[in-house]
Image (cartoon, helix red, strand yellow):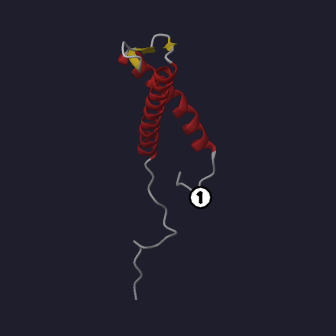
Amino acid sequence: MSQSRGLDAAAPRPTNELGERVLVIACLFGGVSGLIATVGMLLAAVAFTTARTIVIPFIATFEGFHDSGGTNAVTVTGSWAMAGALTIALTIIASFFVLRHLGSSPSATPRPE
């Protein structure tokens, strides 16, 4: 009887290290984008409820105020380019630390040289 080599768990798997790095960076970009959006929404909510102005230099201004009817309102002005630059900068910084950590941690299965 011949044994199928395709199902051998001990056979070395080919690795795609570049693909893994791109996936990590793409996921970090999505996470950083979500984090920046969440912080922006929280700052808008704070400016709305407290009727205060919150300024993040070069990125956004959240101007909370009372309108003519006496209800709270908020105006958000900002720069999409600077928010994008902040997202890219934070993604680069985070990917440096994450990829450095992944490169130094021992893997469960040894990779072929």
Q: Is residue 28 above or below residue 11?
A: above
Considering only vertical position in the picture, is 39 above or below 12? above
Q: Residue at x 40, y 22 (%)?
A: 84
Which residue appears at 53% of the width and 51% of the height?
113
**Relative to residue 103, is residue 65 depicted above or below?**
above
Q: Nearer the viewer, residue 65 or 45?
A: 65
Residue 80 location (% of width, % of height):
36, 18
Q: Nearer the viewer, residue 21 or 50?
A: 50
Give the vertical position of 63 relative to 4 (above or below): above
Quadrant location, the N terminus: bottom left
In the picture, measured across the screen, residue 94 lies left or right of residue 70, that is right
Q: Label 1: which residue?
A: 108
Between 32 and 46, the one nearer to me in the picture: 46
Mark 1: amino acid: Ala
Q: Residue furthest bottom?
A: 1
Q: Where does the image place residue 77, in percent across and percent down from the top left?
A: 38, 14
Q: How many marks?
A: 1
Q: Position of residue 40 (x, y in %)?
A: 46, 25
In percent of the image, x 59 and y 54: which residue is there? 107
Image coordinates for residue 67, horizontal then vertical, percent: 38, 14
* Label 1 SS: loop
Mark 1 Cα shell of 10 Å, populated few (<14), some (14-19), many (≥20): few
